[in-house]
Amino acid sequence: MIRTHVLSQGKLVNQDLSLDLLRVVRYDDDVQIWVDMEKSTPEENKAVLETVFDFHPLAIEDCVAVSERPKIDDYDSYVFMVIHAVDYINSRHVFQTTELNLFIGRNFLVTFHDEPIRSIGTVHERLQKKGVAHPRAPDLLAYHVLDLLFDNYQPALDELSAELATLEHRVLTGETQDILAEVVNLQSEVQRLRQIMAPQRDVIARMMRGEFPKVVRTHLVPYLRDLQDNLSRISDLAETFRESLASTLQIHLNLQQMQINRVIKVLTILATLSMPILLVTSFYGMNIRHMPNVDWPSWEWAYLYILVLNGVLIFALYRFMKRNRWL
């Protein structure tokens, strides 16, 4: 699907142009063009990216292929940017990223993505409203798209934060089934989020430093600073999530160790208390002539004597351990 918008002096003057008309309007410096390509076919990609705008083959290749790392490249009359939108899938405990490719020129903005992106849809709806001033330049229009895209990180972060709180509560209440696997999985997802944030901050920082003066105007720096602040906040949250997961994992391991220690303590006490029985039965199990149940009047008194002796020894050992606070 290809959507085109033609703006002049902050007003939407035309939209959904044919490719032939788009090729003509492309060279009109008095208008700004926004072409949004969503799930476009290879034929449409060739017609728009190669024929209409004549983008560099390497830029087209990076645009069509999946790129895991955000970046920005400078060409003669435009810049090519790769940014990622993020959504958190709670049922699968994973971050789902959607790649957004932007070609920003002096009088055009081309956005390319394979899946629907909320920020693109929101900007498209705003352009349809009459009586509302619209961006007068492609770089400012790109800022609005990126600003909404980064704002849409917040719902994903809120869902992740709620899941972390639930996970921590389960650990503290002793519900430890499958906790380790969930914590490790979330740690990998948070690390993935941090790996996305770092290069995106570098992209915005390069734009703020004025590395692309032909396309990004100087007075756009305050807007870019707002994007950088938003990304910094998201990066700080990701770092907080990482520390929270590490703390949750440590608590889980400590609780597991405490449970193991309790089991070992009980087994040690049982083994210690059974020592008198082992000693007495071992002593009377020796093959000697004079044994209590042989020489004594009856075997009942002999076994009673052994049981009482074991009981006295066990009680004495128990009192000794209790006095020394070993129990």
Image: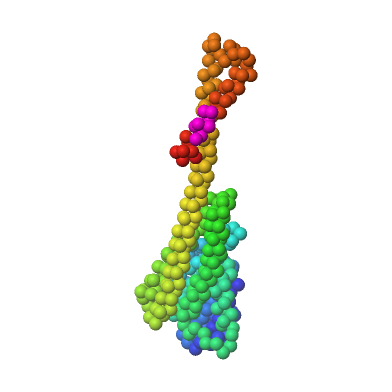
Percent position (x, y) of residue 300? 63, 19
Q: Quadrant of the N terminus?
A: bottom right
Q: Which residues are magenta?
A: 312-319
Q: Quadrant of residue 127?
A: bottom right
Picture layout, residue 280 above or below residue 119 = above
Observer-nearest residue: 325 or 74?
325
Magenta residue check for 149: no
| Residue at point 54%, 53% (across, down) | 171
Magenta residue check for 315: yes
| Residue at point 55%, 57% (across, down) | 169
- Pick out the residue farthest to the front: 297
Observer-nearest residue: 257 or 78?
257
Percent position (x, y) of residue 255? 51, 49
Q: Quadrant of residue 235?
A: bottom left
| Residue at point 55%, 87% (across, down) | 132
Visible residue check, residue 280: yes
Percent position (x, y) of residue 37? 56, 72
Visible residue check, residue 272: no
| Residue at point 55%, 69% (across, down) | 155
Labels in figure, total: 0
Picture layout, residue 98 above or below residue 217 = above
- Horizontally, residue 238 falls left or right of residue 159, namely left
- Horizontally, residue 107 falls left or right of residue 47, namely left
Observer-nearest residue: 112 or 243?
243
The scheme the figure's colours follow is: rainbow
Percent position (x, y) of residue 233? 45, 69
- Magenta stretch, main secondary structure, is helix
Picture layout, residue 325 above or below residue 278 = below
